[in-house]
Image (cartoon, rainbow, N blue to C red):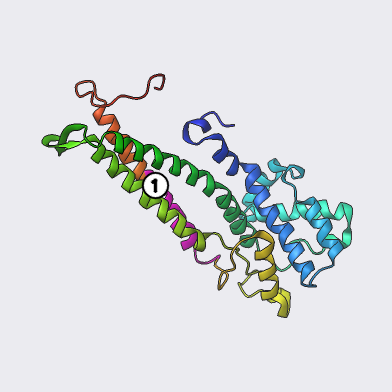
Amino acid sequence: MTLLGPLFAPGEIRAVFSDQACLQGMLDFEAALARAEARTGVIPRKAAASIAACCQAERLDAEALAKAAPNGGNLAIPLVKQLTALVAKESIEAARFVHWGATSQDAIDTGLVLQLRAALPLIEADLKRLSAALAALAKKHRKTTQVGRTWLQQALPVTFGLKVAGWLDGIERQRARLNETKARLLVVQFGGAAGTLTALGPKGLQVAGALAKELKLGLPDMPWHGQRDRFAEAATVFGLIVGSLGKIARDVSLMMQTEIGEVLEPAGEG
């Protein structure tokens, strides 16, 4: 745990995006790739079993990976090198087939997609709880009058329930956006060095389909490692969620000012 980690994210989310989870995501890709290639007859089944058995993040030297990454330009290159060495200790033959037909970005992008898939239910659960709390608060205070404001100046009266309903409306839109982006985000990335899967010959598309099934991810129409809109869309949705949460926080902080005192935090929280 980092010193400031709890300040910015709860423990479950921090675990999903930890260094170990990052490595495990890429290793899950490598294990699934080996199984998919064995299933389609590209590599021997024994080789796939040996590779999958070594795909455990705790077996890698994370410090060495971090030091080697700058020279490789990414983390996947030294990771595959370490994984190959681990597999070679069990089977020289199997080591030949580590990362077979793939490229670094395949492992990096698919690994991140797997991390995001693990994170989404946590985010959705938090938003669902928030929506339920806001709905109850809006109903309770649907007739509680308060000062309405424009440019922070007093205007016509409103109800606190109406203000809370506005917060709820924003959160509900973000929940819908988050759900809508799943189909585009939760897909495998697999294209090989040039996006053609040439190294796999006529079985490239067959392996891609088997890989998607292994990982329980969608199969996109084309490899997308050169098209970053999937991650950009997810980042945008997360930003919109933060914006809606920030709106609530700013409204509450303004209403909590000493000279206004319209709302207070629950007792025992600060």
Main SS of the magenta part reads helix
Segment colored magenta = 225-242
Is residue 152 visible from the viewing direction of this image? no
As rendered, which of 156 and 194 lies closer to the eye? 156
Q: How crowded is mark 1: few (under 14 residues within 10 Å), some or many (20 or more)?
A: many
- The residue at 41%/22% (across/down) is 269
As rendered, which of 191 and 185 lies closer to the eye? 185
Is residue 94 visible from the viewing direction of this image? yes
| 66 sits left or right of 141 in the view | right
Which quadrant holds the N terminus?
top right
| 210 sits left or right of 224 in the view | right
Instruction: Classify mark 1: helix, strand or loop.
Output: helix
As rendered, which of 168 and 6 lies closer to the eye? 168
Q: Mark 1 points at which residue?
A: 241
Residue 238 is covered by the magenta coloring = yes
Classify 29 as above or below 256.
below
Residue 21 coordinates in the image, percent (x, y): 64, 45
- The residue at 33%/35% (across/down) is 137
Given the current orientation, which residue lies at the most extreme left position? 155
Question: Dividing the picture into quarters, in which one does residue 257 lie?
Answer: top left
Classify 100 as above or below 246.
below
Which quadrant holds the C terminus?
top left
Residue 60 is covered by the magenta coloring = no
As rendered, which of 167 and 202 lies closer to the eye? 167
